[in-house]
Amino acid sequence: MTRVACAASLLVCLGLGTASVLAQGPVVRDATPGGTAVKPTADWPCWRGPYHNGVTASTQKWSATWPAEGPKKLWTTKIGQGYSSPVVVGGKVFIGGFGVPKLGGKKDWDTLYCLNADTGEIVWQQLLPNTGVNIGTATTPGVDGNVVYMVSNACGVGAYDVQTGKEIWAHDLGEDGVKAVERRCWSAAPIVEGNLVILNGGTNGIALEKATGKVVWKSDADTAPFMSSVPFDVNQQHLVLMVTGKNMVAVKPADGTVVFGAARKEISWKVTSPDMFADPVVLGGDVELSGAWLTLKDGKVVLNKEGDRKRNLELGSTCQPILYNGCIYAPHAYKSFNSKLEEYGYRCRDWATGDIKWEQKGVCGQQILVDDKLVILGIDGNLIIVQATPEKYTELARTSIFAGYKDGVRETHCLVAPAFADGRVYLRKGDTVVCLDLRQN
């Protein structure tokens, strides 16, 4: 999104569409908004990257062949605690953390940080509205042009100048009936659609004018979940999919009109964890959420019971899945969330049939796809590069980045999705951000 000590999760927004081709190798995406080609970009502007689904094409040739000591580390920076994922635009890294005393007071506060992407130096930091309860900043910011948008744990959304951090506007979502999120904090990432900032709050979402913060449309009061809004195209319509406290809906971003919808109780699914962290995966009119296979049809979201057993891979309990070349790549919890590492397995599964192509036990973590390679930050602090192919599990590289992992102790786990920009990978654990240079010389 975007998990927390309070179980606030990582945030999100995931794109979709049809197959296309990408530079730097024959990479085909199943999930690009509008079916557009993946073009190399030097930025990672929002949660899950430039295409909102964890997939990118690198502007720089990069290597998964490293010396024994691992890839070159450019810098390490300490910030506030949290689960906010890095966002990289124009040589700057934007990320949230919980750890700056508010105006010299005793309580820590949600803070939006801007770091120099070359050195890790803190350029500026901006305090955000919060209750002062230390649960770790959970959401990931989003950059659009010269503005960065961020939401605090207390449901305060704001727009800030990317150069100075100066507040442009701020809005309290609580005034619009957006209740405290599950586990008492906001987690879902903001997404920009046209002139709107769309947030997964209320029964069917809420949209603010991105220039002013003025409410353009909103829905009834409801508790916001961990998952972010997901933009996608279906039947020549561009929609935004949301899983809210009560519903699953696909809405028109311009005015919030519900095109497809259902109450969550009508499309119930089972996961070993009571919480759902991962965004839905959408391809055409099919949706997969935490292993449940759903279809958007005749204005409704319908649960497809046939073949559901093959798809029950606990996609909501562990990490954000990657949809690529007709396959889903994601960890699977054999027992439950917070199991020992050996009780997880990483799987490649055919999207259409549900058949498992391969699995590798002992691998679990947050992931992105760069060109045709999976970049995984394991919960045990290992950075792992895996070839994205249904043929077999092919591990290309592995190195330890963060120490201190203990089985079953959530506070020791790495739970933040990586970011990749300009041949560099940005990783986070707790209050520590690390930048590695993977560029070929």
Image: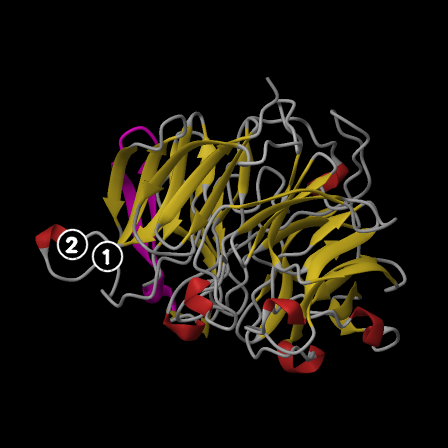
165 magenta-colored = yes
Q: Who's the residue at 74% across and 31% down the image?
A: 37
Residue 149 in view (yes/no): no
Q: CA distance from mark 1 to mark 2?
A: 6 Å
Colouring style: secondary structure
**Residue under numbered circle 2:** 102
Tell me whether the residue at label 1 lies in contact with that at label 2, contact meaning CB atoms closer than 8 angstroms: yes
Give coordinates of residue 234: x percent, y percent: 76, 51
Give coordinates of residue 407: x percent, y percent: 52, 70
**Residue under numbered circle 1:** 109
Tally of numbered discs: 2
Rendering quarter of residue 94 = top left
Boundaries of the magenta span: 156-177
Q: Is residue 307 left or right of residue 417?
A: right
- Give whichever of 177, 333 is nearer the camera: 333
Give the structural element (helix, strand or loop) at label 2: helix
